[in-house]
Image (cartoon, rainbow, N blue to C red):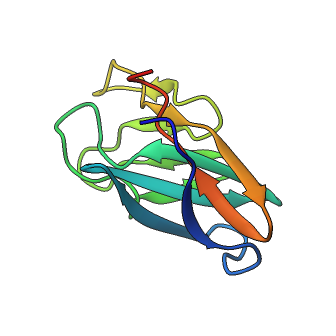
Amino acid sequence: MSDWIDVTREGSLQNGEHVVVDIDGTEVAVFMIDGEYYAVEDVCTHDGAEIASGRLEGCEIVCPRHGARFCLKTGKVLKAPAYEDLPCFPVRVENGMIQVRDERWN
């Protein structure tokens, strides 16, 4: 999948808010933090549960189930019990729409 997918209109997310979209069967969480957009797969790599509803601390998200911590900018795991990074997705704003795409299969 290499096409850009519309997520939501620019300006519809406030600082710290997110939206989850399905991209070909993959749940992707798009966050707006300090005017920038970040997209990660909505799954904690520790146990496979969703992560988007976790607590935000700056550009970090804390898994609501077991407290694993990840950087939303890079997907890097910052605290166990997770040891595998979150997949990240490119985000852009085009014609007033926030868009993401999944480049993993290109």
Comparing 70 with 79, the one in front is 70
Comparing 51 with 21, the one in front is 21
**Residue lying farthest to the bottom in this orientation:** 12
Image-based side of 31 in relation to 34, left or right: left
Q: How many marks?
A: 0
* Residue under the point 77% across and 59% down: 94
* Residue under the point 50% across and 26% down: 78
* Residue under the point 31% across and 56% down: 64
Question: Where, quadrant-wise, is the N terminus in this rendering?
Answer: top left
Image-based side of 90 in relation to 96, left or right: left
* Residue 12 quadrant: bottom right
Q: Residue 15 in the image: state x and y as whole percent.
A: 72, 70
Question: Where, quadrant-wise, is the C terminus in this rendering?
Answer: top left
Image-based side of 14 in relation to 64, left or right: right
Q: Is residue 71 above or below residue 6?
A: above
Q: Residue 20 in the image: state x and y as whole percent.
A: 42, 64
Q: In this view, does 81 lie above or below 49?
A: above
**Residue lying farthest to the left in this orientation:** 47
